[in-house]
Image: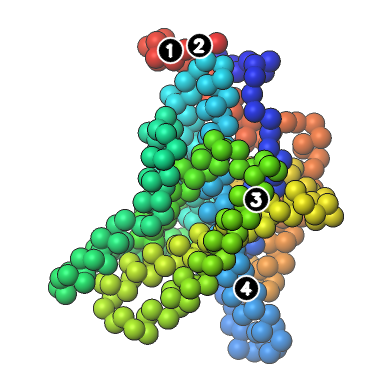
């Protein structure tokens, strides 16, 4: 079955593509200075003081502004995209939930391709957590809001903090991933291409998913998925909702600074690691969430209110429309540039940022050429086509065809 293009459907939301483009641009810059989870840098003791300054300034400023926020925008838009697809099918009299489950399986496969080159990828996590959208998409808004808030508040970490305060002997459970990370680092440092693939698809995946769990990313991702779905339901990406984004901006500004300050200083007052670690996860994730909404609301106002900036932001639309293709190819390119199987570049942070900018420029020019002739990026097109393949007869019994 293929979707009927003549049926009623939501129009593509350009500001969502702007946000996607911004998020993927931010991700490539962060991943470039990290050497795509390699963290192997040359000795900088002999370089100039000026270059040492720029290295530190770039690292600190990029992580402050976009570290943990670009991923959050990406997750928010994943939930928004689900709503658009689900509502399009609902308006045609179809139930999209079973198709979306299949779509998540396909995303898991794409994530495996990405993970084969880059251990820090998020598509596998999205594919696993994405089933929460199927479970909640028919619930009323108040229930979804409650569940989203519960997730972003990090319920497991709250339980761990309370437990550690009640019982001094309590030890926060962690997943021992040291051997996994050591295996991936060894493959990145000295392994062949096939050795890297083997390690990345097992030890690398386990280490990445364990890191996501230990750092609160699983619950935060689920909460952001549901928030993105609510944004779609309520039409928050329309220009008419700008006053609402003004409130979001005000609340986020008020909350960010105390949360960020507490995250920075709480270690000076709490010495019990079993209380401190989960508490810092709560504070840092909430601070990042607030800053993410500052960025999103700022982009919303800039796009809809300030013509000159809007024209500049609109340049990101082709890049955002091909976000999956750009995200996956970034990992492949970065792996080739920095890992042993490829060029094995040993660059400082400043030079690595310039490499990230060059990758973005090349990808952007390719996107501009591609969208002149195609409606979707290569991976986006394959994902869409595979989503709508003919279902087996026993499955079609549970899905209303067109």
Q: Are marks 3 and 1 in contact (CB under 8 Å)?
A: no
Please tell me which residue is depicted at 46% across the width and 70% down the height of the picture.
Answer: 259
Left or right for 318, reference 57: right
Please tell me which residue is depicted at 74% across the width and 55% down the height of the picture.
Answer: 302
Question: Residue 301 in the image: x percent, y percent?
Answer: 71, 53
Q: Along the line of sight, which residue is nearer the eye, 214 or 80? A: 80
The residue where tag 4 is placed is 61
What is the distance, in whole Å, between disc 4 and disc 3 at their CAs? 29 Å
Q: Secondary structure at mark 4?
A: helix
Q: Residues within 10 Å of mark 4 (few under 14, many from 20)?
A: few
Q: Along the line of sight, which residue is nearer the eye, 155 or 380? A: 155
In the drawing, what numbered circle is on residue 243? Answer: 3
The residue where tag 1 is placed is 396
What is the distance, in whole Å, between disc 3 and disc 1 at their CAs? 44 Å
Quadrant occupied by the N terminus = top right
Please tell me which residue is depicted at 52% across the width and 48% down the height of the picture.
Answer: 75
* Rendering quarter of residue 144: top left
């Amino acid at each position: 079955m293929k979707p009927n293009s003549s049926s009623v459907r939501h129009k593509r939301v350009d500001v969502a593509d702007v946000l996607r483009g911004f998020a993927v641009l931010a991700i490539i810059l962060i991943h470039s200075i990290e050497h795509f989870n390699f963290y192997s840098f040359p000795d900088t003791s002999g370089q100039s003081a000026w270059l040492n300054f720029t290295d530190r300034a770039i690292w600190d400023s990029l992580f402050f502004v976009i570290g943990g926020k670009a991923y959050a925008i990406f997750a928010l838009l994943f939930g928004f995209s689900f709503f658009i697809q689900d509502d399009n099918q609902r308006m045609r009299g179809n139930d999209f939930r079973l198709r979306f489950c299949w779509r998540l399986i396909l995303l898991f496969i794409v994530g495996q391709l990405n993970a084969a080159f880059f251990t820090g990828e998020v598509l596998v996590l999205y594919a696993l957590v994405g089933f929460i959208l199927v479970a909640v998409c028919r619930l009323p808004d108040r229930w979804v809001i409650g569940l989203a808030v519960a997730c972003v508040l990090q319920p497991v970490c709250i339980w761990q903090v309370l437990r550690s305060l009640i019982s001094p002997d309590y030890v926060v459970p962690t997943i021992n991933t040291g051997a996994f990370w050591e295996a991936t680092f060894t493959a990145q440092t000295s392994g062949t291409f096939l050795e890297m693939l083997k390690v990345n698809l097992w030890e690398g995946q386990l280490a990445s998913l364990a890191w996501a769990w230990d750092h609160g990313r699983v619950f935060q991702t689920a909460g952001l998925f549901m928030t993105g779905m609510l944004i779609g339901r309520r039409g928050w990406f329309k220009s008419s909702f700008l006053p609402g984004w003004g409130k979001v901006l005000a609340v986020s500004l008020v909350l960010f600074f105390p949360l960020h300050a507490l995250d920075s200083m709480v270690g000076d007052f709490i010495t019990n690691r079993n209380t401190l670690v989960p508490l810092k996860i709560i504070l840092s994730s909430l601070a990042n969430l607030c800053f993410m909404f500052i960025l999103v609301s700022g982009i919303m106002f800039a796009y809809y209110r300030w013509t000159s900036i809007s024209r500049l932001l609109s340049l990101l639309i082709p890049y955002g429309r091909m976000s999956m293709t750009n995200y996956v190819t970034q990992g492949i390119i970065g792996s080739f540039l920095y890992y042993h199987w490829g060029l094995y570049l040993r660059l400082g942070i400043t030079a690595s940022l310039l490499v990230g900018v060059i990758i973005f420029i090349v990808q952007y020019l390719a996107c501009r050429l591609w969208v002149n002739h195609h409606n979707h990026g290569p991976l986006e097109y394959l994902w869409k086509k595979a989503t709508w393949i003919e279902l087996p007869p026993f499955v079609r019994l549970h899905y209303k065809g067109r």
